[in-house]
């Protein structure tokens, strides 16, 4: 037995030293192993080398078979495959692949169409959120804060006792009151104007387009104090108080406190108007269309308030008349096709069914308080100018170069079809919202019959937290806690903003 074992061991040594290793190449070929070193790939490689999947004698040029962009727009990838939502079984389904391949073969520009359909352009950014603000993007929701991006199709919501200021990419400001829901549908850059479409689902919004000319100095305290301080630290009044404090001696500090001098407000307003002059006028004006279930407003160069509660009336007010403004109301009803121009600077009331409206000479206190909260907002105006310089002017410099506008900023340049798009939306929203009103009323009636409370009218919840903060702030305007901010160094001031700029 031992002899047999040692004979087998000796035979294995002889085979390994002679014949077995000489058969290495045939074994590799049998197993399908690569024993050649691939050539080194030079330059930037995003996909496999053409030499691995095509031959010169095929004479097929990809750009003639399937059209695509040489460089994708900002926000798009080179690949259009939705990897995050791709189902592996569908990906490997040969039947589905054959069907898709047949469609692609007769549609050479299918990649361009997919890119256009799936691309969501940047509509705005969150300037300030006090309280809890959330955005729904499809079926997913997330909390948003300062500098959060808002894309086409997003629904922005503010919770109870929460307020949000949104900076639109054309330079417009939009304020959302407590318990407000707004769907930001689209933003389109055209040859002569910018078009923004939103839907007010519920709550109160204040629309503030960027105005021309200087803003007069106002020494009264800011009315939307709940939103202060801003996380844009150079916009706060405290920033200018600190700069003045650094340049003064002790006697000057004492004199300023005794006289309650407002040099910081003067410096803030000077900075605002200087930056406003440097930025100049926006080359394109914005047409804004806001849709509510029972009415639609179409405006240009107009400050206005708009509030609506499901199942109730809508209220709006045009703030002031300026040169080149447009302001029209679109009612509901399948036969009410003509817009109604609005010229009066009064509150207007739209009936629940959206078939009629009337001016209100004596507006209730609830509406007057909503108007008061955005009367003086110089810090927010200064933050707007800072962001206009950083975000909007670079877009405007490329608006006449469609390729640069797409690659550098992610926007599609519209032509004459923008007006046709607007006319379609006016007709479409009037019809669809007229139908939705009936369904909404049926739903609310069922909820009330089941004992659930439905708030159809305006309540103090729309303004309570903001008004209380403003009134209490008047009492503590010059207390020690407020005045000591000017003595902080840069680090302490930054921490103070983070602690007090959100809650």
Image (cartoon, rainbow, N blue to C red):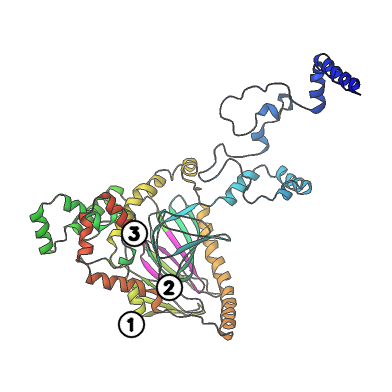
Q: Main secondary structure of the magenta part?
A: strand
Q: On the picture, is 333 further left or further right than 357?
A: right
Category of crowding for the residue at label 3, using alpha-carbon neighbours closer than 10 angstroms: few (below 14), some (14–19), many (at least 20):
few
Q: Report which quarter residue 448 is drawn in.
A: bottom right
Name which residue lies at 86% across and 17% down.
11
Q: Is residue 328 above or below residue 365?
A: above
> Which mark is on residue 499?
3
Q: Residue at x 92, y 24 (%)?
A: 1
Q: Is residue 334 visible?
A: no
In x, y percent, where is residue 93? 76, 48
**Upstream in sequence: badge 3 or badge 1:** 1
Q: Which residue is mark 2?
A: 307
Asked if the magenta segment contains residue 306, the reply would be yes
Residue at the disc numbered 1? 362
> In the image as oriented, which residue stretches furthest toward the front?
2
Task: Name the quadrant of the C terminus.
Answer: bottom left
Query: Is residue 129 rendered magenta in the image?
Result: no
Q: Nearer the viewer, mark 1 or mark 2?
A: 2
Magenta residues (range): 287-309
- Element type at mark 1: loop
Q: Are marks 1 and 2 in contact (CB under 8 Å)?
A: no
């Amino acid at each position: 037995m031992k002899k047999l074992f040692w004979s087998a061991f000796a035979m294995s040594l002889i085979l390994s030293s002679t014949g077995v290793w000489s058969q290495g190449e045939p074994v590799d070929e049998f197993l399908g192993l690569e024993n050649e070193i691939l050539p080194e790939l030079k330059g930037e490689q995003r996909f496999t080398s053409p030499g691995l999947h095509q031959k010169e004698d095929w004479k097929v040029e990809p750009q003639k078979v399937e059209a695509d962009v040489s460089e994708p727009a900002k926000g798009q990838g080179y690949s259009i495959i939705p990897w995050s939502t791709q189902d592996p079984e569908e990906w490997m389904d040969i039947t589905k692949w054959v069907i898709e391949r047949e469609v692609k073969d007769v549609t050479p520009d299918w990649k361009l169409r997919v890119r256009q359909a799936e691309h969501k352009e940047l509509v705005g950014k969150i300037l300030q959120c006090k309280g809890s603000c959330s955005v729904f993007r499809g079926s997913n929701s997330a909390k948003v804060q300062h500098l959060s991006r808002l894309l086409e199709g997003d629904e922005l919501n503010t919770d109870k006792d929460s307020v949000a200021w949104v900076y639109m990419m054309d330079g417009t400001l939009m304020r959302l009151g407590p318990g407000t829901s707004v769907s930001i549908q689209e933003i389109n850059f055209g040859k002569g104007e910018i078009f923004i479409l939103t839907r007010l689902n519920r709550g109160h919004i204040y629309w503030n387009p960027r105005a021309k000319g200087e803003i007069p100095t106002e020494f009264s305290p800011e009315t939307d104090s709940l939103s202060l301080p801003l996380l844009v630290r150079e916009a706060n009044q405290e920033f200018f108080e600190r700069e003045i404090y650094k340049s003064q001696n002790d006697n000057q500090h004492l004199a300023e406190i005794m006289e309650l001098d407002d040099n910081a407000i003067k410096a803030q307003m000077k900075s605002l108007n200087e930056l406003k002059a440097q930025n100049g006028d926006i080359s394109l004006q914005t047409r804004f269309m806001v849709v509510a279930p029972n009415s639609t407003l179409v405006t240009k160069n107009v400050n206005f308030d708009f509030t609506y509660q499901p199942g109730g009336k809508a209220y709006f007010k045009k703030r002031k008349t300026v040169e080149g403004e447009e302001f029209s109301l679109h009612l509901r009803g399948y036969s009410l096709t003509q817009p109604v121009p609005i010229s009066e600077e009064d509150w207007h009331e739209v009936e629940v069914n959206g078939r009629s409206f009337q001016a209100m000479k004596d507006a209730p206190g609830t509406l007057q308080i909503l108007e008061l909260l955005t009367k003086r907002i110089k810090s927010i105006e200064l933050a707007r100018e800072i962001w206009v310089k950083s975000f909007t002017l670079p877009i405007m410099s490329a608006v006449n170069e469609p390729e640069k506008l797409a690659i550098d900023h992610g926007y599609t340049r519209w032509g004459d079809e923008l007006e046709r798009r607007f006319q379609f939306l006016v007709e479409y929203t009037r019809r669809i919202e007229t139908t939705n009103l009936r369904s909404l009323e049926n739903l609310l009636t069922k909820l009330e019959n089941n004992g659930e409370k439905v708030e159809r009218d305006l309540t103090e919840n729309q303004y309570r937290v903001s008004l209380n903060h403003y009134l209490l702030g008047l009492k503590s305007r010059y207390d020690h806690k407020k005045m000591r901010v000017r003595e902080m160094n840069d680090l302490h001031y930054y921490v103070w903003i983070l602690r007090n700029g959100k809650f």
